[in-house]
Structures are given as C-alpha cells and as structure tokens.
Image (spheres, grey):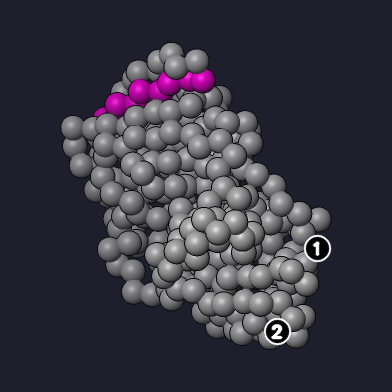
Amino acid sequence: MTLDVILFTSPKAGSGAAREQLPRLAELLAAAGIQYQTVTCPRELNAVATRRRETGVSQPVVVAAGGDGTISLVASSTFPETPLLPMPMGTENLLARYLGQSNAAEAVMKTLTEGRAIQVDAGEANGRLFLIMATAGFDAEVVRRVHLRRKGHIRRHSYLKPIWQTCRAYRFPAIRVTAIDVSGEVIQQRQVGWAMAFNLPCYAAGLRIHPSATGDDGNLDLITFAGRGLLSGFGYALGIVTGMHRRFGSVQENHVLSLRFESDQRVAYELDGDYAGRLPLEIKTLPQRVRLLVSC
C-alpha cells in the first residue's frame, strides 16, 4: 500500500481503554505494512507537512488522537491538502461524532483504508484555526474556569462546579458584534450579551444551538442573544435545552463571511471547546481549508 500515516497524540487527551487503542492501531498499521510515525509536537508535524509539500511528495494521513482542540491544532499545523482523521479521545468529541468516527482502532483502520476525503471550511479567530465554533460570553467563561482548574483529562463532571460558579458571578457584560456578509457589507452592528459563530452544527451535550450550520458553504453562521443579565441567561439556557431559543425575538441569526467581537470589559472566548483568551476577537471564514477522511 502507498498509504503512510502520522499518529499525532495529545498527552492530556484520553485515558483508560480509549488510550489503549493507540498501540492497537499501531499494531494494525504494522501488520498491514503501512508506514507510520508518532508525533506529539505541532512544530514537528508542520515540518513534515511542509517538507512533503516543498518536495512534491504526497501528504500523509494525520490521525489526530485527542479531542476537538487536538484536531484543530493538527489542522493549523498542516495544509488544505493534508488528509486528517479524528481519533476521538476528548470529553465531547464533537467533530468525530458529527462524522460518525469511533476511537476503536479497527474503526480508524477501516476509515484509513476504505474512507473518502471531503473538503470543509474552517474559521480563523485571531489567527487560530477552529473547525466547529467560536463563542464569547457565558459558556466561554465556564470553559475558562475549567481551564484554570484543569489537571489532565477533563470529564463532564469537571464542568459542574465552574457552571455553578459562573451562574453566581457572571453578569453578561455587553459584547459589540460587527458582522460582514459575503458581499463585504456590514449586516449587523449591535450590543449583545452572548455571541456564537458556528462552522458546524455541533455543541456540547448534544445541544442544537445552530442546527442549520453547514461546513461547506463558505460562510459562518452567527447567532447572537441580545438580552443581558442572569434572568435572560437562564431564559436562553432553557430555550436552548428545549430547542425553542431560535424563536425568541432577542435572538438573531446571520450568514457571515467575517465578524468582530469586542467588549469594554473582560470577556472570555473559546474555540472548539477550549479557552482561547479575552476579547477582542477577529473572525473570518476559510473556505475549503480542511480535508477530512471519513468513513464510506
């Protein structure tokens, strides 16, 4: 076989049986005569991909063993022609669930040998790639608090205390949103309490905040929640859980090419479930930026 593979692993991702699938995958690759190497450093991964590109050698398939942040990191370190395959070992694994990809070594091997490549959009936020979403406001503050407490692999119960702390302390400071459509026109300038930009229709706990988002239309799907304060926040949370939030008059949706989030206060933002910093945030669409290997 001409296929060759890079196994990119995140030391913080996965535990127990999930982590044991990595050596099993290595065994399957060796048994099939497929050349592979293990990489843990993004710079090393980028060096391999760059060298291949400069010498005209085909790109390897990169198996990203970790969570959604790991696959985004791998995408940032490679090129649009590099095939990527998520091997889910994170907490939510939103992209892998969306693609229907298991972390079982046999399932990953089957996708490697029998799968097909698709090209999808990505977003770029302050120079950093994301595949699923960028959000600013309440949920990003929860993610920030989880980040500060993190000591290794995160599980869902890791969010319970940060959610409670955020509910008690967060006051929904104003976020200024400026959105630009495909024609370059400003289509939204407003102050909101919560803002989210989706590339794919995925969110934690299976919540469908923007279910119509698609990753191959060259746009991001912006959803904003104008209300501010704790009562509005609880109302939005209830609406999201019940799937009714898109009917609220204070909730607005737009297809956008680029956008900007700003605030006069310290507001956190997150990318694909990872804390990434404080506003301001400049976001743009990168059409067809990522090649994914998916099962047939």
Tag of residue 30? 2
Q: Mark 2 and mark 1: span between their CA atoms? A: 17 Å
Inspect this view and state whether residue 27 appears: yes
Tell me: 111 left or right of 92. Answer: right
Q: Amino acid at mark 2?
A: Ala
Q: Position of residue 194 (x, y in %)?
A: 37, 34
Q: Is residue 115 above or below residue 172?
A: below
Q: Quadrant of residue 47?
A: bottom left
SS class, disc 1: helix
Tag of residue 270? none
Which residue is nearer to you in this view: 247 or 76?
Answer: 76
**Quadrant of the frame with the C terminus:** bottom right
SS class, disc 2: helix
Q: Position of residue 221 (x, y in %)?
A: 53, 31
Label 2 packing within 10 angstroms: few (<14), some (14-19), many (20+): few
Q: Quadrant of residue 17?
A: bottom right
Residue at horizontal 52%, vertical 56%?
Answer: 54
Q: Position of residue 191 (x, y in %)?
A: 31, 23
